[in-house]
Amino acid sequence: MTMAKRDTYTPDSLLAVAVEVFIERGYDGTSMEHLSKAAGISKSSIYHHVRSKDELLHRAISRALDGLFAVLEEPGALEGRAIERLEHVTRRVAEVLMDELPYVTLLLRVRGNTDTERWAMERRREFDHKVSDLLKQAAADGDLRDDVDVRLATRLLFGMINSIVEWYRPGRGGAVSRDEVAEAVVRTAFAGLRRP
């Protein structure tokens, strides 16, 4: 992490710096001193925008969760057969993950050590259950293969999508595009899930 000297900063730019530091050092290993050095501002300037390190964590995780839950409210997630809605959600979750990469990366790394982390884990479970319900409905509709275990399929689907944070780096030479990744996720997952 390079030290940034900023003459002007906003709550959003401060949040972006905090997320980088949290990912690099871990939330527990990050102090307000680390954040002030990375942002190139004083600790008192940080406190002008937030009450605590925990507030920065909450804002960052909320940004990721808000993006994920918004997918569930899109017309493609609400209309049509369950299998079609599930495909829409799968594609859009992969896209949100790539669009909000640092924020979702941080969300996926919380371990429940603070109230905010426990809240985030509970919200993630709630999201996972909603997607799992779509898989169950697709199975009940007869659109999934008979030999697919829905609980296992849910875990594998999320495992594939969540692994994107480990390797996807936009803008690097030869990197596949966001749309190519999302399409590959859907094709790979649903080739194995859909009834032939």
Image (cartoon, rainbow, N blue to C red):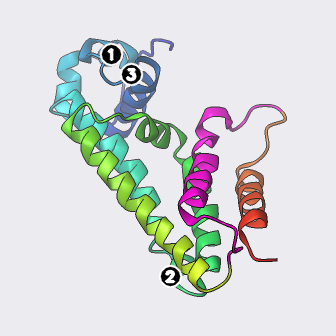
Q: Which residue is found at the position 54% from the left and 41% from the top?
A: 101
Q: Give the quadrant of residue 91.
A: bottom right
Viewer can see residue 196: yes
The residue type indicated by label 1 comes to: Gly
Query: Which residue does the image show at 28% across and 39% down from the upper left?
Result: 117
- 126, 176: nearer the viewer: 126
The amino acid type of the residue labelled 2 equals: Leu
| Span shown in magenta | 144-173
* Quadrant (top left/top right/bottom left/bottom right) for the C terminus: bottom right
Give coordinates of residue 164: x percent, y percent: 63, 42
* Residue 48 location, quadrant: top left
Q: Taking 184 as reference, is 97 left or right?
A: left
Residue name at image x 78 percent, y 53 percent: 180
Q: Which callout, 2 or 1, points at the residue further toward the start of the chain? A: 1
Residue picked out by circle 2: 78
Q: Alpha carbon of mark 2 to alpha carbon of mark 1: how far?
A: 41 Å
Considering only vertical position in the picture, is 125 above or below 88?
Answer: above
Q: Which residue is mark 3?
A: 26
Dot 2 crowding, Cα within 10 Å, few <14, some 14–19, many 20+: some
Q: Which residue is mark 1?
A: 29
Q: How many marks?
A: 3
Callouts 2 and 1 close, C-beta under 8 Å: no
Q: Secondary structure at mark 2?
A: helix
x, y (%) of residue 21?
41, 22
